[in-house]
Image: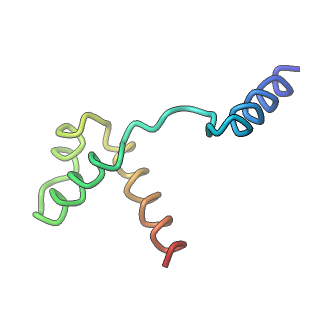
Amino acid sequence: MWLRFGVAGLAAARASGGLGGRRLLVIAEKLAVARRMLSEGRGKALIARTIGVSRPTLYAHLAAAVDVAEVVV
């Protein structure tokens, strides 16, 4: 029953122009800062602390950004 409510809620969000689901922790500006720091040779733990996320979250967003870039190209 709860699954039905969840699916209906996501469908309503999409219909009104939203995405639904949990908000992203890493926005484009933070991801740009992370990429710049990474290219400068900074450690991932330092980068994660700087942008205010955990290392696993940083890894996930960097990997997702690479996957999206491959699809766009």
**Residue 30 horizontal side relative to residue 6, left or right:** left
Q: Residue at x 82, y 27 (%)?
A: 3
Instruction: Please identify the quarter of the rendering in which residue 55 is found.
Output: top left
**Residue 30 horizontal side relative to residue 16, left or right:** left
Q: Position of residue 68 (x, y in %)?
A: 50, 65
Q: How many numbered circles are shown?
A: 0
Q: For the view shown, which residue lies furthest in the right direction?
A: 1
Q: Residue at x 26, y 55 (%)?
A: 32
Q: Is residue 59 above or below residue 55?
A: below
In this orientation, which residue lies closer to the viewer: 60 or 28?
A: 28
Q: Residue at x 77, y 36 (%)?
A: 11
Q: Position of residue 62 (x, y in %)?
A: 37, 57
**Residue 8 horizontal side relative to residue 58, left or right:** right
**Residue 1 horizontal side relative to residue 11, left or right:** right
Q: Is residue 66 above or below residue 23?
A: below
Q: Is residue 5 above or below residue 58?
A: above
Instruction: Please identify the quarter of the rendering in which residue 50 is found.
Output: top left
Q: Residue at x 62, y 37 (%)?
A: 18
Q: Position of residue 34 (x, y in %)?
A: 23, 52
Q: Which color scheme does this rendered protein use? A: rainbow
Q: Quadrant of the N terminus?
A: top right
Instruction: Please identify the quarter of the rendering in which residue 53 is found.
Output: top left
Q: For the view shown, which residue lies furthest in the front direction?
A: 16
Q: Position of residue 36 (x, y in %)?
A: 17, 60
